Image (spheres, grey):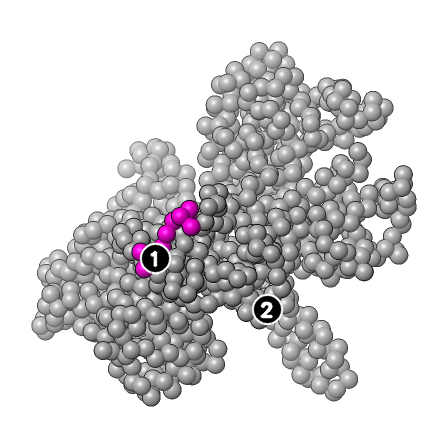
Amino acid sequence: MATILVVDDAAFMRMRMSKILSEAGYDVVQAENGLEAVEKYKASRPDAVLMDITMPEMDGLTALKEIKSHDPAARVAMVTALGQQQIVLEAVKSGAKDFLVKPCEGDRVLAAVSKLCA
Amino acid sequence: MATTKGQRLQFDLDDDDLKLFCEEADEQIELLDASLVQLEGDPDPDLVQQIFRAAHTLKGSSATIGHKKMANLTHAMETVLDAVRQGRKSANAEMVDALLAGLDALRELAREVVTRVDSGIATAALEADLLATLEADDPDTQSLPSAPAGAGYQFSDASVQAALAEMGQGSSCYFVEVSISPDCQLPSIRCFQVLQELDALGTTLQTWPDRDVVEAGAGEFALTAALLSRQSDEQLQAAVEVVMDVGAVHVRSVPAEALGQPMTAHRVPAAAAAPGKAQLAVVESAAPGTDGGKAPKKAAAQSVRIDVERLDGLMNLVGELVIDRTRLQQIRDQLSAVLKDANLTELTENFEETTSHLARVTDELQEQIMRSRMLPVRSVLTRLPRLVRDVATKCGKKVELLTAGEETELDRSVIEEISDPLVHILRNAVDHGIETPEERRAAGKPETGTVTVTAWNQETYIYLSVKDDGKGIDTRTLRAKVVEKGLMSRDAAEAATEEQAIQWIFMAGLSTAKTISDVSGRGVGMDIVRTNIERLNGSIMLQSTPGKGSEVIIQLPLTLATTKALMVVANSTVYAIPLVSVTEALADHEADIHSVNGLKTLRLRQRLLPMIDLANALGDSRPRSIEAGRFVVAARHGERQVAFTVDRLLGEQDVVVKSLGDLVGNRKGLTGATILGDGSLGLIVDTASLVSEQAMLATA
Amino acid sequence: MATRLDSTIEVTGQPAIEEHVVIFRLADEYYALDIQTVQEIVRMQAITSIPGSDFWVEGITNLRGRVVPVVDLRKRCGVDSGEYTAETRIVVVSSSTGMVGLIVDAVSEVMRIPGDQVEQPSAIVSVPENTYLRGIAKLEDRLVSLMDLDGVLPASAEGEFEYASAAAA
């Protein structure tokens, strides 16, 4: 089964996302900031990444760019709060495949992930 | 031809559109005026492009509003300019003369849109002159037929040229219409992703809305693109459907011969497909033809529909910025105090420079965003004629309502709040101000009374005036009334000047109509109107001349989102007291404090103000801090004044007003909360209600 | 937001089969809130009290720029109030009166409770007027009360200031 990297600095969000995904049978790797996300990406080569935008250490957009420069085929969906439209646009321009708007419903997350992994 | 002069004209645009149309037309005409003369000889290609675009824009907008003469004339001008632009023709004196003659006529034609009276200008001869300049020495000048806008998506001439060139080489031209699911929260991003997919498969010639508009995040739920591609329509369809939230996709190929023709929309695009959940604010009011796919390219570039929530979000963000700015200024002051001795003047100077620049930019940003939230007051005024008619019928009066300044703009939040007070004042004017037809006849006035509602802006305020030509306020009745109701002693009532007496209309518990009519209702007086206006940090004034009529003027701040306040601490809680109501703030050792009937009283400018502990007045029942009551803040509401004692003064600050939330509701004496520099919260004092309540308690 | 979530449940059509909840502790008792209503869980932070408000309203707090009212759930539920500890949390929920923070003694876990383990409150607790609960779950080691958010939080406080007649137009 596919491996998903869940990146979010908020433990609760991370937990919720991970739970949704692991219950659907995915393997989940977690990271709590952009820097850790880049490292974990390199280490575990996940099939898809769910990336929060606003995070300490390294934000989601920078992390996306790092990951893309390391692996141009990386499949990343940005997880955004409302009000970050321009950042999401920038992310899509930088190679993000999709985005999810918080709060995310389970079905929505799963649909996005299965599309990403397809 | 001149026989049509003076006839009434009708155009397909409402008042909102009119303003935009005129602004734009003036701009383009000015541009043509300044640049046409430079066309002769070997002009700068950018300039030619600019001139062409001006004519093109004028053509589009005049066609949209149904101004045929103007559209035909600009079409002729555009045709000539297009030939110059494409190098098929170079401009000579004759051509420039014809264009300038056309321009003069355009000016008149544009004015017709405002006056709605035919100016009698004949355009046929001018058009012939223009086209003749093309035929003169080059008989095969034929610009591509460009049909007038209005039927749907119109390809630009540049698109047509590009398409024709490519289609010869195995590409097909497609028209791709995509709608985004209404639940999608960031539709613009989906549209952009669709564009990305299309870009990968071919060359997009043109999109509706424009690519810039999509990237700016206007929130459109539909996208239409004209695309040159070697792929099949099925392949395009499949590629677009990969993007999440994409609803219906419709791809059709466009035959070469149809390229110059306007394309009709397959489905209703954009706005109409948007979901019902988002309330849309029209910023800068929509250009003619934004809806329904008429000339969408032009319109979209000039005004953008923004979700109100998004606008509120922006306003909140700027609010945060304002707070940070204030905080930064505080840090700057602390820093420069600390670093003064450390020989780090360059550092502190740089820091100071940066913070003051940030402060300026923040102010500007706040101003700009506030402007984008502005709506014309028209939406409130349009309710009034019906109201006046109803009230007048009920009272058996004849009243004509005149309104002026409908285009005066004010913040959405103010618009929402102003409606009720305005309606109330207007009811009063009709019910109590205007006389019956018989009374008016007897007084030598026309039977029909007039009520005029006017709105205007001045500095950072908006003013609304309700003026009637009725009987005015009868101060004799008023004087008798206040005595009868026990609101004043007979001596005091007699001693008051006319001006003072008129202001009693704002007193609680006073109704001037001899009987309580079912129109003005029971118990709702001008005192409540005043309280509500002052709650909005506004003020209300009344002028009246017996026999001639009355005028009520409301003054309101342009926005309710932020307010200037004096920050104080009372019993460890930070409060913001709106500056409009603060008359004086001083330390208690500077204050002239007396004991009157055992109550602490502040003497301020010949007035005695009851001194009230702010925390107590608000119902703070926690144990008091030791430093209690070392400062005094005098605050007023209308004629009433009280002096609040507080523990500390923190200075003036711009505060962003936030609601306390439904759970807490409207607490007595508080209007909301605000975020302080350190992230904690302060409470905003509702001086209007608190001052009147406390002043009343003190006199009781 | 709440309405969106509600509609999801309706579409699924199987609300009773399983309860997906956040479990928290108040004094010695465990309570659960539907995870869909929980927006966020934060540590105890500065709260500004509001003079004259109900005793169980602790005040308001700044949640990343939003002013959120905070309710002391112990006081609201009539449990003896205790000291705040390192485990004290504010559970931010989205209710019919907007975002509200609930102070709880500790958040223990997120879990799914099978529907057949949930009973109506009246079957176990003989307090018919207890509107805070919508069910009791019997887990292996303890009882968990399923809290009814709308029961705990009253409908919005009445605005005391109203425009009497003018609004009628």
Segment colored magenta: C114-124
Queried whether the magenta region covers residue C122, the answer comes back as yes
Amino acid type indicated by mark 1: Gln
User: Left or right: C157 with respect to A4?
Assistant: right
Per the picture, the main secondary structure of the magenta-coloured stretch is helix
Under mark 2, the amino acid is: Thr
Quarter of the image where the N terminus of chain C is located:
bottom left
Q: Which residue occupies 52% across, 58% down?
A: C102
Chain containing the residue with disc 1: C
Looking at the picture, how far across and down is residue B79, in whole percent?
24, 58
Say which element carries label 2. Answer: loop
Residue at point 59%, 68% (across, down): C85
On the question of residue B675 being in view, the answer is yes
Check disc 1 and report its element: helix, strand or loop: helix
In the image, is residue B311 part of the stretch drawn in magenta? no
Q: Which residue is mark 2?
A: C85
